């Protein structure tokens, strides 16, 4: 099942280099994988859990639990439990951005990195073959088998820098 790319993924180009995300083929839909995970652990497949996984699977933005609870008009406890199960099932990844915990798709998405604007909280996803080569070379050097990695580069995005009336020199560099 090819992964649908959200709008803007191809906007991450720099000097003719393509930093856009590719696609990953998966055997099961996110809903089927989640049901398989719940069954294997003897957990109930409830309508609220299915509604949450279906809603999350349709969106491609990073989100937090409170935002999701508000969108679904569901209790925060139900949402937090479902998100915990979705992370454990490998459907979502939880990241800490500043003081926030945000979630993003993991199942069916290629390895990618993030740029985080500390002024507006925007997250920009990109993929880099060069970074993967460095990760693999360092891992080989230390006889280490990588399973995953997370790279979040914090800074100020172009929109925030250009919108500042009194920008600092280091923000313009």
Image: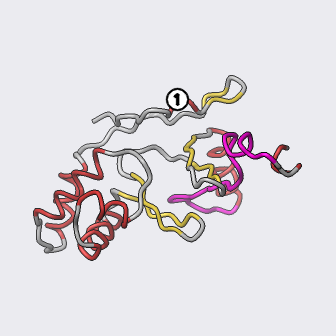
Which residue appears at 81% of the width and 49% of the height?
A: 171
Left or right for 161, reference 7: right
Left or right for 101, reference 155: left
Q: Quadrant of the N terminus?
A: top left
Number of labels in the image equals: 1
Label 1 residue SS: helix
On screen, residue 64 above or below 78: above
Q: Nearer the viewer, residue 88 or 168?
A: 168
On screen, residue 142 above or below 55: below
Neighbor class of circle 1 (other Cα within 10 Å; few <14, some 14-19, many 20+) is some
In percent of width and height, residue 11 lies at 56, 30
| Residue found at the far top of this picture | 16
- State the colouring used for the structure image: secondary structure
The quadrant holding residue 85 is bottom left
In percent of width and height, residue 172 lies at 83, 44
| Residue found at the far front of this picture | 165
Q: To which residue does mark 1 refer?
A: 10
Q: Nearer the viewer, residue 154 or 111?
A: 154
Q: Nearer the viewer, residue 140 or 114?
A: 114
Which residue appears at 14% of the width and 67% of the height?
A: 39
- State yes or no: residue 64 in magenta: no
Left or right for 135, reference 168: left
Q: Quadrant of the C terminus?
A: top right
Which residue appears at 56% of the width and 63% of the height?
A: 97
In percent of width and height, residue 8 lies at 49, 33
Q: Which residues are magenta?
A: 142-165
In percent of width and height, residue 119 lies at 66, 55
Which residue appears at 54% of the width and 46% of the height?
A: 112
The quadrant holding residue 46 is bottom left
On screen, residue 12 above or below 170: above
The quadrant holding residue 37 is bottom left
């Amino acid at each position: 099942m090819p992964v649908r790319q959200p709008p803007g993924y191809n906007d991450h180009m720099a000097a003719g280099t393509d930093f856009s995300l590719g696609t990953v083929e998966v055997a099961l839909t996110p809903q089927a994988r989640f049901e398989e995970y719940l069954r294997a652990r003897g957990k109930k497949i409830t309508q609220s859990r299915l509604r949450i996984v279906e809603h999350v699977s349709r969106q491609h933005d990073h989100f937090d639990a409170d935002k999701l609870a508000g969108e679904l008009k569901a209790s925060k406890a139900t949402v937090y439990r479902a998100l915990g199960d979705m992370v454990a099932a490998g459907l979502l990844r939880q990241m800490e951005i500043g003081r926030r915990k945000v979630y993003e798709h993991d199942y069916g998405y290629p390895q990618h990195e993030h740029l985080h604007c500390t002024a507006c909280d925007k997250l920009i996803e990109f993929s880099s073959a060069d970074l993967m080569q460095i990760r693999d070379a360092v891992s080989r050097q230390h006889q280490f088998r990588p399973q995953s990695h997370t790279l979040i580069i914090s800074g100020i995005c172009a929109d925030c820098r250009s919108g500042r009336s009194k920008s600092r020199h280091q923000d313009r560099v």
